[in-house]
Image: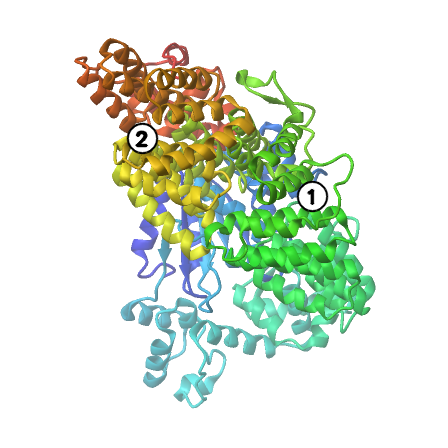
Amino acid sequence: MRFLGRRTEVAVVEQLLADARAGRSGALVVRGEAGIGKTALLEHAGDAAVASGFRVDRATAAESEVQFAFAGLHQLCATALERVRVLPDPQREALGVAFGQATGPAPDRFLVGLAVLNLLAEVAEEQPLLCLVDDVQWLDEASAQVLEFVARRVGAERLALVFAVRDDGGGMPSPMVGLSELRLGGLAEPEARTLLASGVPSPLDERVRERIIAEARGNPLALLEPPGNGHSAWFAGGFERPDALDVPRRIEETFRRRAHGLPTQTQLLLLVAAAEPTGQTTLLWHAASRLGIAREAANPAQDAGLVEIDTRVRFRHPLVRSAVYQAATGDDRRRAHQALAEATDPDVDPDRRAWHRAQAVHGTDEDVAAELVRSAGRAHARGGVAAAAALLEQAAALTPEPAVRAARALDAAQAKHEAAESQAATGLLAVAAAGPLDALGRGRLKLLRAQIAFHTTRGSDGAGMLLDAARTLAPLDPQLARDTYLQALEASFHSGRLGGDGTMAAVARAARAAPPTSSPARPVDLLLDGLTTMFTHGYAASVPTLRRALDTLRGGIDPQGPDGGEGLAGGVGLDEGSRRRLWLACQVAATLWDDDTVYVLAELDARLAREAGALSRLPAALNALSSVLVLTGDLGRADELIAEESAIRGATGAPPLPNARLILAAWQGRQAETTALHATMVAEATRRGEGATLGLADVAMAALHNGLGNYGEALAAARAPVERGELTFASIALPELVEAGVRAGEPAQAGAALEQLRERAQASGTAWGLGLHARSLALLSTGSDAEEHYRESVDQLARSRMATHLARAHLVYGEWLRREGRRQDAREQLRTAHEMLTRMGADAFAARAARELGATGEHPRRRTEKAADDLTAQELHVARLVATGATSREVAAHLFLSPRTVEAHLRAIFRKLAITSRRELRDLHLA
């Protein structure tokens, strides 16, 4: 009778198991209201899996566990931890810290997710594995995010995951959104009648039967536990007043009535069991003994079918637990928690003991509040930011001394902000503001309020609020004040042309009031001073200080790094503040046309994020590195990293970041794709108030249209960043504006842009900048002067990393030579340009070179198909890593996949390339 009317749902689950057994991993989210049959379906899945040779691991979340970081995850993985030794060191260490079994830096939760993925994959290598997680809506946030990551990242493992989630119905965010779903609805009326008849042995009055069926709305538990269960008047004629509650609440009320009819000692024992979410029988009896409850008190509850107590405590249904707990008086709840706190070993489980003590407090208690603060510290150290925030919030509420309460509320607000709970953080700021706070506390409050405002709105007021906080902090904490001034500059960069009065120039003028630089100056200090100088005294004046900032950041780079690139020396030597500024430093390096530094720092940022397993930070770093790689001419690798970034964002549930995709599409000359991406980006950026994105979109469109020969459109796109003097984008747009102006017959606009370009290039002194200036000057010159400048541009750009601009220098030089009637010389330059641009994949510029070559009488060779052209971006990435000699485990760790998924990719690669070994792959020279 358990699956009456559920044949379709059972078939879906059984297909999931069949796919997993065949090495096609999958995840399924079962949704529905309380009592609809989710747990029963999970139990059937477990039984079916065991019957077909699966190992089954289970976890059931509890509402009272939500403040314990990784509690649900530990419950699921407990029996698999014996295999943890096979994990790579960073993953094993991250998992140990998360579970409180080791000490170390707080791990990125997605590195924990990768560790769990590989741990489960290892188990599944020996035996197919089914993971069942019930009541996911009550998982602690850290566990929920990790399991969602695992569900999105599974591929070729013999692994299936099934999650049961209760529909909230109250507008709360729902977990596991976007995964494959199975929604359970009510039973059809015939099945409902059959189930009701099986569950109620005594004859039913016809009116009562119809009423039960109508009000149950097909909910199986409501049919098996009708409202009048145990009340003869209900079944005889329905004389009791009907509830006005919805079905789950009505079921809960039924359980409450049944519990209320039990002996007093039994009710108290049930309450202790409901307050203790781990289900430990020993702990339950120790707590019961402190309340003078005999073990026999459990018998009536077990006879009533509300609970089972053997090796573990198991309630008939989660609604029984909530019904018992909610129906208890405050005094009884506090008694239960106090008994549980006394029964909990403070050395073995100090955090759970602290939580029980907190629930036992009536009013305030400094000792308990201090214990919660210590628990929050441990949670934060394990990477449980949300759990730490909740514990700090509770600590503040229990603190009797107003000044201490205000300080703890401020700390709790900071933690809530880190956990992306902006609304809760704002509420705690109000508590902190009620004070009293000391002067530094008031400054920190202003800073946090500004950070929250900028995070939530990206509006122009963010920079102004940060400036106000910086002024307050200046006499109290000079270093924090300087950091805050730099945050204000960064905020004004993000808001850009949509920032109203909060422009970078306005913020820079205000930042002149920052406290003096400390000695020795930090990279943050030099960035602040350099950017302030740029927008108050001009580009040239800022270059020496900004170059010192970039050199200081590069001070930890070892030139003998892996793969012939720059490695990391001695732990890099960068403090956390400097690491957070690597993205801004890349913008500065691009502004100075420092091609080597922008590449090195972008690589460094991505490598640091990858080595730390910081998947929350890695996508943005990959996005920035991809944009740089487009300019260096490595469009293929950029495409691979964009695919990796997209896959990670999909696995972590983060929103897409299309910046690099737009730049790549523009340089590839894909007009339709670029135009569509541009329209979406501009609309979204305008809505969010992110003016910097509009600047990036403009320079991408300028490159696209210069490649296509649409010079009027290129001129219009390049003009805005230059006229506004936007950081980074003005420097990138200037050469586009010069070329477009010359070709569109607007020499005055081209000349004005050239003058700005000259000033910047001479101040920066880099090969990239000087090469762009020489190329642009050549476009506006004639005769022998023009040729001299063209040759200089080729020579300079050949010494830089920016191969795309070198190829374009050959292109415009060849175009000029053809117009001068020097067809043979033109062919040499145009042939070089065409070969370079074709090899890169910059198809619009390559087509432009091909047209010019055709005009000289030479027809360029068609691009030959490469063996790797049939590979997806991710397959090509895997292939290149394997071709270097990396093992499947090493590739898996690099790309945040499981080894089995890497092997599946390799099988596809071998099939597409018609090869059978890794040695053959190395011989193809894919890199």
Q: Is residue 29 left or right of residue 826?
A: right
Location of residue 554 in the rendering, given as x and y in whole percent from the top left corner? 63, 27
Q: Nearer the viewer, residue 642 or 187?
A: 642
Residue at 62%, 50% in the rendered image: 509
Location of residue 262 in the rendering, given as x and y in whole percent from the top left corner? 62, 76
- The amino acid on which the numbered mark 2 sits, given as a three-letter code, is Gln
Q: CA distance from mark 1 to mark 2?
A: 49 Å
Position above or below: 301 against 52: below
Judging from the image, what secondary structure is the residue with disc 2 in? Answer: helix
Residue at 43%, 26% in the rendered image: 772
User: Which is more foreground, mark 1 or mark 2?
Assistant: 2
Position above or below: 361 against 44: below
Position above or below: 2 against 673: below
Residue at 71%, 65% in the rendered image: 295
Considering the image in quadrants, where does the N terminus appear?
bottom left
Q: Is residue 821 visible?
A: yes
Disc 2 target residue: 668
Q: Earlier in the sequence, mark 1 or mark 2?
A: 1
Disc 1 target residue: 100
Q: Is residue 355 visible?
A: no
- The amino acid on which the numbered mark 1 sits, given as a three-letter code, is Gly
Q: Quadrant of residue 530?
A: top right
Judging from the image, what secondary structure is the residue with disc 1 in? Answer: loop
Location of residue 766 in the rendering, given as x and y in whole percent from the top left corner? 53, 23
Location of residue 27 in the rendering, given as x and y in whole percent from the top left corner? 41, 45
Q: Nearer the viewer, residue 576 or 750?
A: 750
Considering the image in quadrants, where does the C terminus appear?
top left
Q: Quadrant of residue 834?
A: top left
